[in-house]
Image (cartoon, helix red, strand yellow):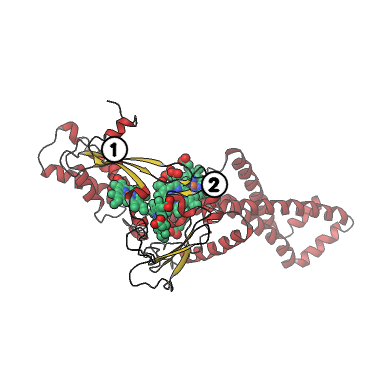
Amino acid sequence: MNRFLLLLRSNWITASGAVLTTLSFMAFVTSFVYFSLHGGGHGAYVGLFAFIALPAFFVLGLVLMPLGLFVYRRQLQQRMELIRHKPFRLIRVIAVLTLVNLSVVGTAGYEALHYMDSQQFCGTLCHEVMSPTYESYLDSPHARVSCVECHIGSGASWFVKSKLSGLRQIAAVLFDTYQRPIPTPVHDLRPARDTCEQCHWPDKFAGDRLVVRQHFDEDEAVTPSTTVLVLKTGGVRPDGTATGIHWHVHPGNRVTYVATDGKRGKIPWVKFVDEKGKERIFTVEGQDPARPPEGEMRTMDCVDCHNQPSHAFQEPDLALDEAIAANKVSRRLPFIRKVGLEALKKGWTRENAKEGILKDLEAFYNANGTLAADVRALIPPAADAIAAIWLRNIHPRMGITWGTYPSFTGHTGCMRCHDGEHLDADGEAISMECSTCHATLAKKEKDPAILKQLGLKQE
Ligand code: HEC
Ligand code: HEC
Ligand code: HEC
Ligand code: HEC
Ligand code: HEC
């Protein structure tokens, strides 16, 4: 061992390599043990340091050691003279250390790849680029599903593909050549069969969904109303046939379409093939059914409706209704639905939005009569809640504003086809009756009787 240390100290390059390797080895092992015990709840930069920087230092040290010996090879020869009579032990020490090194590099490599698949890495490292997505993701039903489970899925070929595309993206960020807003649809997204359907089985969909939604008017009293729908999400009947909204993704049905606007928004041509292979083609006026237009052709899967399944952006009026319903924005403030919505639509920056919205509300209430002191005290919390909605959804530097990423699970998405203008050879339209998709039990009613009948409201 002494002789080995003698070798390491033979010149300054080798010596610094040895120090670097030893220190980063100790730091890596410590953080590895720490993270194994405490789970992965560390920030992106801690991970970057522990799993990428430390192993890099470790390897750098390993490279420096032989490099130094090579550069100062004359001195090395002299030292070798000193230890010539016991060469075997030296080889044994080097062999053992090499094994240790390989296992460290292996573990580090594994941890580095693992770390690069974490939400922290995907969501926060390129902070400005991904933070809009990341913030809305944390506020979604998929907040515990990692980005890679939808964006990459399992299997080696998609893994390699994603790492290559990741390198391209890092280059785009470094050289600032990426597009703002980040364009959708994501064209090389993995098919939903390999991602969504690993957790949600289309032939297991069953049951409809009750939607009770509070709305508020723009009047002085901020009058509440309630909409009650039964969304026929359906999927399969007990006998296995398809029904309802998830009918489109039932294994027996195939709906293919061509979109011509690059955003899957304009759809002039739709083909439906049923279980028995019978075809129906629906087209808008002026479109030849036999000749699909130029554009992206897709067979409908989950993502054609659930295009914002995670990291979903909100609509200002619905988000404000939710905040009023949750009493984060108090209805005791006259006209708050109207003033709040106006404030949400102004062109703030991320730096001045919070302060600006508060000033805006104060100015409105100062100019319009006097408020009782206890009502006036409700302005700052209301302004905070409204600013929070703005900050969650608007990112001027990333080009994201209201409507940049529309959701296709509502009328906007459905009416791309169900608009009464897509006709088949017999002149029959893709169904447009309200009851195809939902039973509308109450539409903006003051006090819907149905809620009492359902036992959702006592009186
Ligand atoms: C539940 C599945 C799911 C999860 C989890 C998920 N994504 Fe997505 N993401 C999608 C789908 C589907 C699209 C494609 C939308 C389209 O093409 O219309 C998408 C699109 C995107 C886009 C393009 C812009 C946009 O909003 O449409 C970005 C950027 C993105 N994802 C980043 C992330 C990051 C970062 C994470 C983790 C913090 C993440 N995603 C987690 C499913 C997911
Ligand atoms: C790793 C598993 C996993 C994957 C992959 C996954 N999901 Fe989910 N999904 C979940 C979980 C867990 C929930 C939450 C269930 C709950 O809250 O009851 C959920 C909830 C949902 C919901 C209900 C949201 C709501 O408002 O309640 C939708 C819609 C959905 N997922 C669609 C998708 C789509 C589309 C994809 C593919 C792009 C996908 N999921 C991929 C696990 C997953
Ligand atoms: C034709 C459009 C459409 C397609 C295609 C579609 N969904 Fe849905 N899905 C909806 C709508 C609309 C809802 C109800 C509204 C909501 O929850 O956002 C819904 C609700 C859900 C829910 C919530 C649970 C429930 O039953 O209420 C899950 C989970 C879900 N979808 C998963 C999927 C998966 C996975 C796929 C692909 C296999 C898929 N969906 C395909 C439109 C669609
Ligand atoms: C790409 C075109 C397209 C889009 C987008 C689309 N649909 Fe459809 N949908 C069809 C076609 C084609 C049919 C079959 C013809 C018909 O039933 O009129 C159909 C049928 C249906 C049916 C009847 C299923 C049955 O039991 O026969 C429902 C319910 C439905 N769609 C709901 C929706 C909802 C909700 C959305 C939006 C979230 C939506 N669709 C979006 C093309 C589309
Ligand atoms: C192709 C399917 C489809 C058809 C046809 C359809 N809707 Fe809807 N509708 C939906 C879906 C999906 C939602 C839920 C969207 C959401 O969660 O905001 C919805 C939501 C609604 C809402 C609730 C909006 C809210 O925020 O309170 C109303 C009201 C409504 N629809 C009225 C109608 C009426 C009236 C018709 C007939 C003229 C109709 N819809 C036809 C799919 C459809």
- Amino acid type at image mark 1: Ala
Residue in the foreground of this view, choosing between 56 and 374: 374
Identify which residue is drawn at 55% across, 55% down: 193
Residue in the foreground of this view, choosing between 23 and 33: 33
User: In x, y percent, where is residue 434?
Assistant: 32, 50
Would you call the spot at circle 2 few (<14 residues within 10 Å), some (14-19), or many (20 or more)?
A: few
User: In x, y percent, where is residue 411?
Assistant: 33, 53
Look at the numbered disc 1 and give the secondary structure of its residue. helix
| Image quadrant in which the C terminus is located | top left
Identify which residue is drawn at 81% across, 63% down: 78
| Residue 164 in view of the camera | yes
Look at the numbered disc 2 and give the secondary structure of its residue. helix
Would you call the spot at circle 1 few (<14 residues within 10 Å), some (14-19), or many (20 or more)?
A: some
Residue in the foreground of this view, choosing between 446 and 139: 446
Identify which residue is drawn at 79% across, 55% down: 94
Q: Is residue 70 above or below residue 53?
A: below
User: In x, y percent, where is residue 226?
Assistant: 27, 39
Of the residues under marks 1 and 2, which one precedes in the sequence?
A: 2
User: In x, y percent, where is residue 248?
Assistant: 46, 54
Name the mark on residue 199.
Answer: 2
Q: Residue furthest top?
A: 459
Find the distance from the CA under tag 1 to the CA under tag 2.
Answer: 32 Å
Label 1 beta carbon less than 8 Å to ligand 5:
no
Name the mark on residue 325.
Answer: 1
Residue in the foreground of this view, choosing between 385 and 43: 385
| Residue 129 in view of the camera | no
Q: Residue furthest front?
A: 426
Residue 323 in which image quadrant: top left
Q: Is residue 300 above or below residue 205?
A: below
Label 2 beta carbon less than 8 Å to ligand 2:
yes
- Amino acid type at image mark 2: Cys
